[in-house]
Amino acid sequence: MCGIVGYVGENNAKDIIIDGLKKLEYRGYDSSGIALNIGGKLVVRKCKGRISNLEEMIAGENLFATAGIGHTRWATHGAPSDLNAHPHTNGDNTIAVVHNGIIENFVELKEWLSRDYGVEFRSETDTEVIAHLIGIYYNGDLLDAVYKAVDKMRGAYALGVVCAAEPDKIVAVRKDSPLVVGLGNNCNFIASDIPALLKHVRSIYLIENNEVVLLTKNEVKLFNAERKPVHRDVFHVTWDADAAEKEGYDHFMIKEIHEQPKGLYETLHRRIGEDGIIRLDGITMTKEDIERFSKVYIVACGTAYHAGLVGKYIIEKLAKIPVEVDVASEFRYRDPFVDDKTLFIAISQSGETLDTLAALREAKRKGARVLSVVNVVGSSVARESDDMFYTWAGPEIAVASTKAYTTQLMCMYLIALYMGAGKGVLSRAEYDEYLKELGELPELLQKVLDQENKIHDIAKKLYKSQQVFFIGRGLDSSVAYEGSLKLKEISYTNSFAIAAGELKHGTIALIEQDTLVIALATQDFLFEKMLSNIQEVKARGAYVLGLAKENNREIERQSDQVIYIPECRDELTPILSVVPLQILAYYVAKLRGCDIDKPKNLAKSVTVE
Ligand code: F6R
């Protein structure tokens, strides 16, 4: 997904911007570029491919400037190409723009600009329209021109704009696409994401929708849509800059897999008071509110949706309230039954997934109370919700989500307990027991991580499989979906997950000699049933990798290989059982030589439809 970095100060803008763009590589991109103001002229360099291509392109050029903007692009309008890469400029190259998001009325604007102003377009992008619009409105005041241009635009955008005639300024705008400002000494920054700035600043302004920012090296001014000055409290980033680096691991994904005990610990322990009661900071629901809800909707995409599947099971069990789970791209277009007695829970690592955001807005419009479970502080989903619950997984860089998922699960348990206790359907003894067992999970998870070498060995045997089936029952089927997604997205193995009881209704036709089946059998009360399902596929020649709790050794008789997770109550297994599947996917992808942290065709944050 696209990334923006801008700098105005006294040092070499080119190096600072390129360095910042590299910190955003994890978002996925297909081209990159930079615009620098050198001696009153805008110098733009951009090209398709990795940032290293851009570096090669400008190596040897003297491009010293103290202000500029840079971009990593992920194609939406127009294929990845040198011409479509950002920044885009107006006709006489006096205005340059970088843009994240989509301009919905760009075709209309393009026609108008060509017809009435004779503008000739050089790219296929919607962004180029913005540069021309600002250009035609420019009359010696960049801020004014940006306001006028924005007035004409519909859609989602974070913009960084520079102007040849105002060499010491950047103007930035945000609407439905993230934007932050970094506050330095004799320098200031813009970025689409905080990690791009961590090397330089810790003091940040989180820019709100429809705000416009004017930056010079000594000043940052924020204005609202009516051009009135806005005050913003400084947000102090406490993350360690190293948290965004690999810390000796080969990939961010495996580093993040290992960070899960810490993520779980943080997500849980900071929220339990001395009296043993959960304090959900950011959640203001009262007992009366909870009692009023007649239904819960959990809506999300991808891995976050899979966390929602577990959430449904747990909330229904502990809080005794019906829960529906839906993928956001379906929910937003199907006129779901939502009213003011509905609790809508949005789950999102990035907090910027467009479908999730649109579903949230739809639910809000219909009167639902909106609670979001989000990892990125200050993200759009968090800000537009009535109640927020941060996952505290820390920055997740690998495209494949791992620690966000397990911390999302932890949040599901905490919400279920909070609601169950609030409604009075969960006894204090049960509540205390659950909390105690949740507290033990980080340690149990470490025991799963300690089996990494064994799982690596299993991966060596299985990595050439062309087709893999994940099966499970109850909570195991929800985890099967996540295990399958991990494997397919990073190793490009054709994998498929199905509730084990459904196999015989069609899918079993695909099982033949040596087909790999990964069978999750961690639910004690469904264990016998799973053994029968394993027998069914074994009878057709499948090679079975079983996953069970360590006391259920009988599975060894039915399976070719087995991975065990520590004993815990059935309801809590998903946090443990997903981890061997994450590690397996990681090593299969590694053995297949895949680009693990940046799988093809995928982006970390999907801010377009
Ligand atoms: C898969 C993955 C995606 C995301 C999905 C939602 O590993 O990461 O499926 O879970 O794109 O993203 P967020 O959680 O940012 O809304």
Image: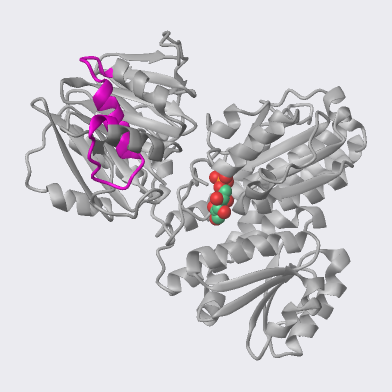
Q: Is residue 117 magenta?
A: yes
Q: Is residue 512 magenta?
A: no
- 472 up-or-down from 397: above or below: below
- Residue 398 lies, in percent from the top left, at 46, 52
Residue at the extreme top? 228
Residue nearest the observer in this picture, 217 or 164: 164
Q: Residue at x 70, y 30 (%)?
A: 364
Residue nearest the observer in this picture, 64 or 133: 133
Q: Is residue 459 left or right of residue 293?
A: left
Q: Residue at x 73, y 42 (%)?
A: 335
- Residue 354 lies, in percent from the top left, at 55, 41
Residue nearest the observer in this picture, 288 or 157: 157
- 570 up-or-down from 157: above or below: below
Start and end of the magenta stretch? 116-142
Q: Is residue 494 left or right of residue 279?
A: left
Colouring rule applied to residues: one colour
Q: Residue at x 86, y 33 (%)?
A: 421
- Residue 449 lies, in percent from the top left, at 58, 60
Residue at the extreme front? 115
Whether residue 217 is visible: yes
The tally of labels here is 0
Q: Residue at x 38, y 46 (%)?
A: 245
- 508 up-or-down from 140: above or below: below
Q: Is residue 219 left or right of residue 390?
A: left
Whether residue 6 is visible: no
- Residue 289 lies, in percent from the top left, at 83, 25
